[in-house]
Image: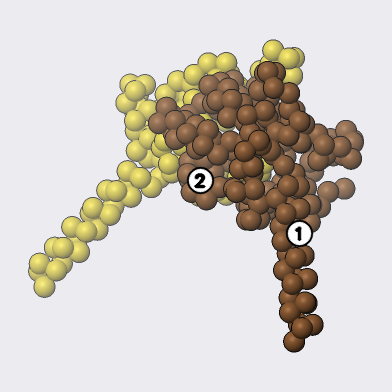
Chain colours: A yellow, B brown
Amino acid sequence: MGRLKGAVLGGLMVWGLTGWAAGGPEGQLQGWAREAGIPVSAFSAARGEALYRQERTSAQGAAIGCFSCHTKDPGQPGRTRAGKTIEPMASAVTPTRFTDPAKTEKWFSRNCQDVLGRACTPEEKGDFVTWLTRVKP
Amino acid sequence: MKDSVKGMLVVAGSVIAAVGLFATGPSWGDDEGRGEEHGGMRASRVPVGAPASWKTECGSCHVPYPPAMLPAQSWARIMAGLDRHFGENASLPPAVAAEIGRFLAAEAGGPRGGEGGKAGTEPPLRITETPWFRREHREIGDAVWRRAAIGSPANCSACHRQAEQGIFNEHGVKIPK
């Protein structure tokens, strides 16, 4: 019985740890915090929102920003230029958001270049994800 | 008895004719007749054995366009410029890009970019530039392409409701108002 209890507890611990690593964005937030040399608590949802709402004028003279594809409301579905629907960015509406670290990094690397014309800093990524995982649209 | 055999023959004949028509229909074409082999007998233009990465990566911004819709040289040009993909950065990790590139090369359409393409010209980067695409959509006016529910010719599934599954035949077409 004691052994069984131990096994169950051990299993739960392993499950909890892998869940922590692969499940939510916590592991990734910690990674960005380490890179930026700040604690996770220093990430700011307000700065993340400002980044989301930031506008830039493209070379063609059009106003571009996250909203170009994701709309100004992260609770609403977006649309790619080719017409495909994008699931809402807010975790509250799309629970799978920011649960796949490789996917998150891939889209940061693409879209920061497209929208800001440069890579995002680890701090910006942390701010952005902090806002989108907390916002209640 | 004789009549029923005759009936069966007529039915079989119609089926063969219909399949033949479909196989040669849109003709993404190619000189070696691979279009028939790959797409003709199946409703879907998605080749069997398409890697999951093709569907998830190419399909995240647009319908994963079936490889037979462009010649191999076109796909090679597209895959070489993913960081500037029609105005967007669509770069991929090298291993994923290599897997998708191999699949596109193996399943690409004919060497001349679809039936009627001119040999010796630059391979098209856009499916909409191929002769077969223009021919198949010649009845669609600019105003239709610009409708809010469509947006552009890149949005196959606006009208071809089963485009995600690789089905583009005319029966499934419903043009939104």
Tell me how far mark 2 sits from mark 1, CA to CA.
Answer: 28 Å
Question: Do the dots labelled 2 and 1 sit on one chain?
Answer: yes
> For mark 1, what is the residue?
B17
Q: Nearer the viewer, mark 2 or mark 1?
A: 1
Callout 1, which amino acid?
Answer: Ala
Provide residue B172's location: percent of width, then percent of height: 76, 55
Q: Closest to the observer: A65 or B158?
A: B158
Residue B122 visible within the image: yes
Residue drawn at 73 percent across, 79 percent down: B5
Residue at x-position 77% and y-position 65%? B14
**First along the sequence among labels 2 and 1:** 1
Query: What is the x, y in percent for residue B53?
Result: 48, 41
Q: In this view, does B70 lie above or below B161?
A: above
Q: Going by the image, does A125 lie left or right of A69?
A: left
Please name whichever residue, B32 or A54, is drawn nearer the observer in this view of the structure: B32
Residue at point 75%, 87% (across, down): B1
Residue at x-position 23% and y-position 53%? A14
Residue at which label 2 appears: B50
Q: Which of A59 and B82 is in front in this view?
A: B82
